[in-house]
Image (cartoon, rainbow, N blue to C red):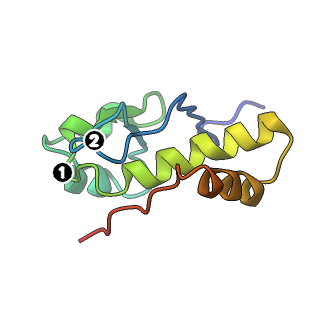
Amino acid sequence: MPTREIDYYGVTFDHGVPADDMNPEVLQINILEMEEDNGAYANKGILFQVDPAKYASVSILAVPRCCQRRKGTTDRLRINSAVETRVAIQAGMSWLDRVQQLENRGELRPAKPVV
């Protein structure tokens, strides 16, 4: 019997966000499901109002970062971590070994604090 809910989303980023990039607004799309809270989360987090009835049972709302209230506060760390995890897996090494490799090469930069 087919399910009426989406149970997984996958996104792959192919490169890290440079530490000196002052505007790390990468392609960041949030998938918002409306049924559980009748659109409350979506209407709180995006810059326009949505009618959750339009998305009930048949559609999802994909919202790019430019239309959301939050801006790249955590994008760099999250995306770069995902990229490095993928690189480590492809190289057959652990994530911690990859971090050590980056530290040894002087390529690991601390994330900017979220305020």
Residue at the extreme right of the image, as rendered:
92
Determine the residue positioned at 54% across, 53% down: 106
Which residue in the structure is indicated by mark 1?
69
Q: How many angstroms separate mark 1 from mark 2 (CA)?
A: 20 Å
Determine the image quadrant of residue 22. Answer: top left
Determine the image quadrant of residue 63. Answer: top left
Tell me the quadrant of the picture where the N terminus can be found: top right
Q: Secondary structure at mark 1?
A: loop
Query: Residue 81 placed where, x, y %?
Result: 56, 50
In-front residue for pair 63/90:
90
In-front residue for pair 24/56:
24
Residue at the extreme front of the image, as rendered:
105
Q: Secondary structure at mark 2?
A: loop
Q: Is residue 30 rendered to the left or right of residue 16?
A: left
Query: Residue 50 placed where, x, y %?
Result: 21, 39
Q: Is residue 23 rendered to the left or right of residue 90?
A: left
Identity of the amino acid at label 2?
A: Asp
Circle number at residue 21: 2
Tell me the quadrant of the picture where the C terminus can be found: bottom left
Closer to the chain start, of discs 1 and 2, is: 2
Identity of the amino acid at label 1?
A: Arg
Determine the residue positioned at 79% across, 41% down: 89
In-front residue for pair 30/78:
78
Query: Residue 41 placed where, x, y %?
Result: 31, 56
Does 100 appear above or below 50?
below
Residue at the extreme left of the image, as rendered:
48
- Mark 2, other Cα within 10 Å: few <14 / some 14–19 / many ≥20: few
Determine the residue positioned at 52% across, 54% down: 108
Query: Residue 40 placed where, x, y %?
Result: 27, 57
The label nearer to you, 1 versus 2, is 2
Does 16 appear above or below 36?
above
